């Protein structure tokens, strides 16, 4: 039968001699790497599995930095700072991120997770019926630490530095296993201390191309805060057939920030500021608990039921003071917001073997969430020489929103013959959203059928070579914020910084996908693979920017809408091996490399470069690890490269992003089996983040460029086991 990640366990083996003890210990040392590779090879659906050793290799403090080295994964945002996670370059929520198989709770950022809280990472290039099909680009499932295998305590002390700012961290865990009960108590405390410098240049031109104005903004900011995570896990094994797992996740964060900006305007406007200072404070408290009960029935059947709830609340307070060119005050804005999210999830799966060839499973998912947001804004106009801008919009907003997601699925894994295995699944998923504020009330409902077919052909007379194929349907539901008609106002309303408003009539984006892959597994833990894919997307969503009358003001407004169809294709190459697997050598060198090339086309948008938004044409990773023979030292490095690219967003708008080259290095000194010291340096290239946006209108055009430096991240961690 196909082997899935959650069902694979090392087999118990009786010990009869000292020689056999030594062999068993050797298997335990390398078992995790081998087990990950075997799971990938034997899975009937394409699944890349990354274990603890690879997750912790570079001593990353952000999960996003771990993911960027995986095949086809890129990040948005500044280098070394995490950012939006994109598979195959597809942003805007086309990549599904799961934690323990469930969507992340509202307000929760994957960057807040510490890598040492993670047991493994599963990457699915195509959807399976068991998980939500909101995965046009693919799915990344982050599995938190699992059951304790033995009594053990661990401590990890971290000292990081970014641009000379120290960022310490501490992780502690204690695990124990008793008869019928095991538990893990784990926690992580870290402090952040960051600085940002940003420069923006906005140039405007008339219809003939002659410059009409220029705004140059120079800004600087600082932020400090701390994060506390508690991730215990408790498992009761009542008997051979029943066990219960409870896994809470508690998070508490606090941060303070301050910033200032100076704007040089070629055409000064007395009603607009030329500088501002801002101070703010943010906090978030979150409690999420998952309960899982599994019962083993007769003849290999299993019944699994899970339930969970989450509660989180966020507070944001800020004050912003604006000044004129001569330094006199123009306006002060106080903003306070309180947001509370409550959610409940439930699901279950019943599985049974059908003879020796089939493994059938049926199940359900249910998720409901409620949000209540209270936002108050108070503007005080301080310039007596200028009348305040008349605005009839009520800034005080009390918004309530709710989402219900419900799904049913069935899947069958079929071992047709030693050479053939197949997977067939069908999932129905419905989503209903509603929201209301003081002015509007909006509701939206959608549902999608998602069939999934996967197949594996193991080439005869070659146990290490196989071909995969899949045909699947996936989708992306509109975000609740994109459905709410209420406007989120920009502080400095321009075509570059428009107000954002939702569209209650948005439809889900749908995509049919086809994948074809060849995989060659080497003698130990290595592999070579090539993967081809295509996606046919309907009802693609883009944001349209135009001027609208809001109250008595003409303001720039950004509104999402379905614009039509799109296609995406790509090829993904991967190699991971020890050098001794390819040639006769004693050099202890490990190689990890992947390269991806993408093409896409959006109908209704003139070319060239009418690509999917945020999609680069290429991405590459090259990593090497060298183990010294005479000292307990391992050193390695990785190059992450994404070339610059240009995307035509609409007939009159384009964006350009500069190339990204990120160099990471690490050194690991193992004092003994209980202690090791890890030194790492991330983003050694220190390439600036440079972006450009161009817009053409009937009255002229605008060109905007932003420049933001990045910094090297130094980290030292001492890891102890007791």
Image (cartoon, rainbow, N blue to C red):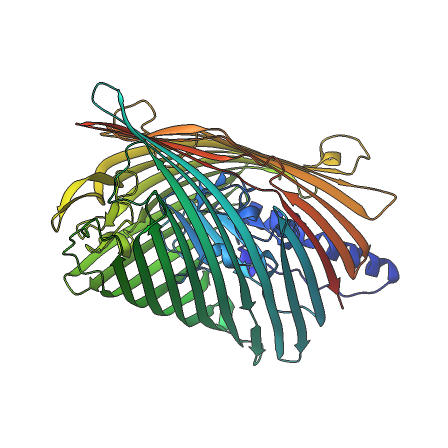
Observer-nearest of 450 and 401: 401
Looking at the image, how many numbered discs can be counted on the residues? 0
Quadrant of the rendered image containing residue 168: bottom right
Quadrant of the rendered image containing residue 25: bottom right
Viewport quadrant of the C terminus: bottom right
Question: For this view, does 444 lie left or right of residue 690?
Answer: left
x%, y% of residue 535? 35, 36
Which residue occupies 32% across, 61% down? 334
Which residue occupies 57% across, 80% down? 239
Which residue occupies 73% across, 34% down? 579
**Can residue 106 be seen from the camera position used here?**
no
Where 48 falls versus 174 (above or below)? Answer: above
x%, y% of residue 163? 61, 46
**Can residue 273 be seen from the camera position used here?**
yes
Which residue occupies 22% across, 45% down? 559
Observer-nearest of 595 and 342: 342
Question: For this view, does 656 lie left or right of residue 686?
Answer: left
x%, y% of residue 185? 61, 73
Residue lying at the far top in this picture: please name it: 208
Observer-nearest of 20 and 354: 20
x%, y% of residue 610? 31, 28
């Amino acid at each position: 039968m196909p082997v899935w990640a959650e069902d694979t366990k090392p087999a118990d083996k009786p010990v009869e001699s000292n020689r056999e003890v030594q062999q068993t210990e050797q298997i335990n040392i390398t078992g995790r790497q081998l087990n990950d590779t075997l799971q990938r090879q034997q899975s009937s659906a394409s699944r890349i599995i990354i274990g603890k050793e690879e997750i912790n290799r570079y001593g990353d403090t952000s999960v996003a930095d771990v993911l960027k080295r995986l095949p086809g994964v890129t990040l948005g945002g500044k280098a070394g700072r995490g950012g939006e996670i994109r598979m195959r370059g597809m942003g805007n929520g086309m990549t599904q991120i799961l934690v323990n198989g469930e969507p992340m709770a509202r307000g929760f950022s994957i960057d807040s997770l510490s890598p040492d809280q993670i047991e493994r990472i599963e990457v699915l290039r195509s959807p399976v019926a068991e998980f939500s099909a909101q995965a046009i680009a693919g799915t990344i499932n982050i599995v938190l630490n699992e059951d304790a295998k033995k009594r053990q305590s661990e401590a990890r002390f971290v000292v990081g530095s970014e641009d000379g700012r120290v960022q310490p961290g501490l992780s502690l865990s204690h695990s124990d296993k008793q008869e019928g009960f095991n538990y893990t108590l784990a926690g992580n405390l870290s402090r952040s201390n960051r600085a940002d410098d940003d420069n923006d240049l906005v140039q405007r031109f008339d219809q003939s191309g002659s410059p009409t104005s220029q705004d140059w903004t120079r800004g600087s900011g600082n932020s400090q805060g701390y994060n506390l995570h508690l991730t215990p896990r408790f498992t009761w094994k009542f008997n051979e057939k029943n066990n219960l797992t409870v896994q809470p996740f508690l998070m508490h964060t606090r941060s303070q920030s301050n910033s200032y900006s100076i704007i040089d305007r070629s055409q000064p406007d007395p009603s607009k500021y030329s500088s501002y200072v801002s101070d703010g404070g943010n906090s978030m408290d979150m409690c999420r608990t998952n309960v899982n009960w599994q019962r083993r029935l007769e003849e290999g059947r299993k019944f699994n039921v899970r339930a969970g709830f989450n509660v989180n609340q966020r507070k944001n307070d800020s004050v912003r003071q604006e000044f004129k060119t001569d330094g006199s005050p123009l306006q002060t804005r106080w903003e306070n917001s309180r947001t509370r999210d409550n959610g409940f999830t439930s699901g279950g799966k019943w599985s049974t073997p059908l003879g020796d060839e089939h493994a059938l499973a049926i199940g359900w998912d249910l998720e409901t969430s409620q949000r209540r947001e209270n936002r108050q804004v108070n503007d005080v106009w301080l310039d007596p020489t200028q009348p305040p801008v008349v605005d009839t919009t009520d800034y005080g907003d009390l918004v309530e929103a709710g989402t219900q997601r419900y799904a049913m699925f069935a899947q069958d894994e079929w071992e047709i013959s030693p050479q053939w295995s197949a997977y067939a699944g069908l999932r129905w998923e419905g989503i209903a959203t509603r929201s209301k504020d003081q002015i509007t009330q909006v509701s939206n409902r959608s549902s999608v059928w998602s069939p999934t077919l996967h197949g594996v052909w193991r080439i005869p007379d070659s146990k290490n070579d196989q071909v995969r194929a899949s045909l699947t349907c996936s989708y992306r539901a509109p975000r609740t914020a994109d459905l709410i008609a209420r406007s989120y106002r920009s502080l400095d309303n321009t075509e570059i910084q428009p107000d954002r408003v939702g569209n209650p009539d948005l439809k889900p984006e749908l995509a049919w996908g086809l994948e074809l892959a060849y995989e060659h597994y080497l003698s130990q833990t290595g592999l070579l693979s090539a993967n081809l894919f295509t996606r046919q997307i309907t009802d693609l969503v883009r944001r349209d920017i135009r001027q609208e009358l809001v109250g008595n003001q003409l303001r720039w407004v950004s509104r999402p809408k379905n614009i039509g169809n799109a296609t995406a294709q790509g090829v993904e190459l991967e190699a991971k091996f020890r050098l001794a697997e390819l040639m006769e050598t004693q050099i202890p060198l490990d190689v990890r490399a992947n390269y991806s090339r993408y093409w896409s086309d959006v109908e209704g948008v003139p070319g060239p470069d009418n690509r999917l938004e945020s999609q680069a044409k290429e991405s590459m990773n090259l990593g090497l690890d060298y183990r010294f023979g005479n000292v307990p030292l391992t050193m390695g490095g990785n190059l992450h490269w994404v070339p610059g690219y240009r995307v035509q967003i609409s007939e009159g708008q384009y964006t350009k992003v500069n190339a990204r080259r990120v160099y990471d290095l690490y050194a690991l000194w193992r004092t003994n089996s209980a202690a090791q010291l890890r030194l790492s340096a991330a983003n050694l290239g220190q390439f600036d983040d440079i972006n450009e946006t161009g817009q053409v209108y009937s009255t002229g055009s605008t060109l905007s460029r932003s420049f933001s430096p990045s910094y090297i991240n130094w980290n030292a961690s001492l890891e102890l086991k007791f």
